[in-house]
Amino acid sequence: MTDKSENKNSQGGRFGAGNEEGAAWSIFGYLIAGLVIWGGIGLGLDHWLGTHFLSLVGLLLGAGSSLYLVWLRFGRR
């Protein structure tokens, strides 16, 4: 008995390892999440400590760490 779900799973599924669209959305998610999370931490520390530079540090840290995670997951072969 063969159905569509079995064929989809044998080809890697909608977000399988061979799907470039799924990889692009994963990369986009990593980049946005890093900026939002670390930028938010920096903004919260700025508000708490009364400074004005930690939000920029948080955004830079988020961008760098998310690019590193993208490289770890998709860049090395």
Image: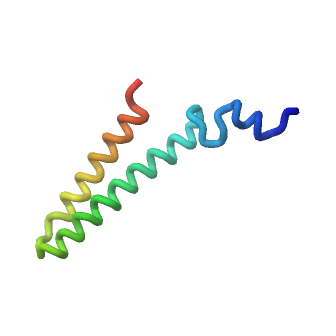
Residue in view at x 41 percent, y 23 percent:
77
Dividing the image into 4 quarters, which one contains the N terminus? Answer: top right
Q: Percent position (x, y) of residue 6?
A: 76, 35
Q: Residue furthest front?
A: 1
Chosen colour scheme: rainbow
Q: Percent position (x, y) of residue 21?
A: 57, 42
Q: Residue furthest top?
A: 77
Answer left or right for 53 relative to 43. left
Image quarter for residue 54?
bottom left
Residue in view at x 44 percent, y 45 percent:
27
Q: Percent position (x, y) of residue 19?
A: 59, 36
Q: Residue furthest right?
A: 1
Residue in view at x 23 percent, y 52 percent:
61
Q: Percent position (x, y) of residue 12?
A: 64, 34
Answer left or right for 1 relative to 26. right
Image quarter for residue 32?
bottom left
Q: Nearer the viewer, residue 4 or 19?
A: 4
Vertical arrangement, residue 76 with respect to residue 23, above or below? above
Vertical arrangement, residue 34 with respect to residue 9, above or below? below
